[in-house]
Amino acid sequence: MVRTRFAPSPTGYMHLGNLRSALYTYLYAKHNGGRFILRIEDTDRERYVEGATDVIYRTLQSIGMQWDEGPDIGGDYGPYVQSERKAMYLPYAEQLVREGKAYYCFCTKEELDERRAAAAARGETFKYDKHCLHMSREEVERRLAAGEPYVIRQNVPETGEASFDDVIYGHIAVDCAELDDMILIKADGMPTYNFANVIDDHTMGITHVMRGNEYLASTPKYNLLYDAFGWEKPAYIHMTPIMRDAQHKLSKRDGDAYFEDYLNKGYLKEAIVNYVALLGWNPGDEREFFTLDELIEAFSIEGMSKSPAIFDVNKLTWMNAEYIRRLSPEAFTAHAAPYYAEAGIGGMDTGILCRILQPRTEVFTQIPGMVDFLAALPEYEADLFTNKKSKTNPEVAKAVLELVIPKLEALPDWTEEALHETLLGLAAAQGMKNGTLLWPVRIALAGRQVTPGGAIEIAALLGREESLRRLNEGLKKL
């Protein structure tokens, strides 16, 4: 059975690159009838952020990516948090020490810094020189008994090559002479990321490892560990990075790196997931819109790209607008409600607001800027009443408002239908084009030339008292 894992570090919000890794890992498992495992890799305590694990849970669950095994639901291969597995790593490292495939290293930070500086002075790249490998067993035991701090290092062969076959990139080989003796167990007793990764993947029965291609350089070291233990290696599938442009990765500083950044900017999670799925994967046909179930059905490794994916926020915004237009009126209103409240129009007719805003909204954060005139009439000058297409100017507008205001004051029912019948009936009775009458009314009601609705919808939203107040204020300007 295919067993994949998503193994994030709890260091903050979900980066879009991590989200894509989780998504592809999930899709591959589900497409192949396998199991999707969530593992929390929290061995780097310096970068650990309190509450970040809950962010991971919340993000995946909100999208619909439910894991089959994980910290909160358990499974046959737990614990699923690395810090809770701490006791299991040292015995594996000690096994390698006994077999000569790893060794205790007592070099201090100061000693290593001195050697690193010396290598730099020679114009060389620093590589640990296996200094402690040649220590006698008696010396090692004496120093251990004395409680000296130590790490355990992998004893990388000095000749030969370390290689692996990646599903996307093919065969990759590295000369062992270029590899450092990486630390397996740190001085605090915690495993390094690389060592814990191998132990966890093997003991959890992971069959396919899907991760970013920044780990391509580390994978030969992983495979040396698999070889040292005599374990079967998983299949490796390394994904290309997501870039902001040809030179730059997505960055936290620019506010374009995290899933929640885009939720806060008013994007729908379904649109974000759909777009992220297409960053580095092609379904092989012309489809662009997918539900999560449709992604599961369509996903294949063959559709994954070797080229970096460029994150185009304009394309995401276009896709988000399409998703917004496909929402039911009830769903649109539910998403828009916080933005109505922010704009100060929470009590207005949501049916009218939905009708005028849904076709025009690309991201929900646009809404306050589109409707702020409803909460407070902006300052404007009389020349705003001039419009060549509608054949209006301040003189025409004055005549229109003098005609309209008494009719609206006498209107028994202030409804959209009654407003429509009254205003268009008045234009017809005067032999006037609809635009000639409606333009001055809209300017007086909105104080701006571009609005998401026309004069009739705006008057219905504002209500009788506020509409008449604004119309009279407009008349005073003329």
Image (cartoon, rainbow, N blue to C red):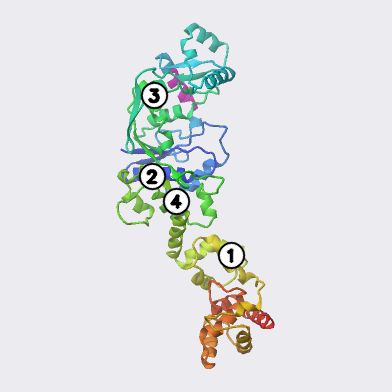
Front in this rendered view, residue 242 or 66: 242
Q: Are marks 3 and 2 in contact (CB under 8 Å)?
A: no
Say what secondary structure mark 4 lies in.
helix
Q: Is residue 2 left or right of residue 270?
A: left
Q: Which residue is mark 1?
A: 369
Q: Which residues are magenta?
A: 86-94
Q: Are marks 4 and 2 in contact (CB under 8 Å)?
A: no
Q: Residues within 10 Å of mark 1 (few under 14, many from 20)?
A: few
Q: Amino acid at mark 1?
A: Gly
Q: Residues within 10 Å of mark 2 (few under 14, many from 20)?
A: many
Image disc number at residue 63: 4
Q: Which residue is mark 2?
A: 24
Please provide percent x and percent y for residue 107. Answer: 54, 16
Please provide percent x and percent y for residue 323. Answer: 43, 61
- 80 versus 463 height, above or below: above
**Count of labels in the image:** 4
Specify the quadrant that holds the N terminus.
Answer: top left
Find the distance from the CA under tag 4 to the CA under tag 2: 13 Å
Question: Furthest residue to the right?
Answer: 476
Q: Quadrant of residue 345?
A: bottom right
Q: Amino acid at mark 3?
A: Leu
Q: Earlier in the sequence, mark 3 or mark 1?
A: 3
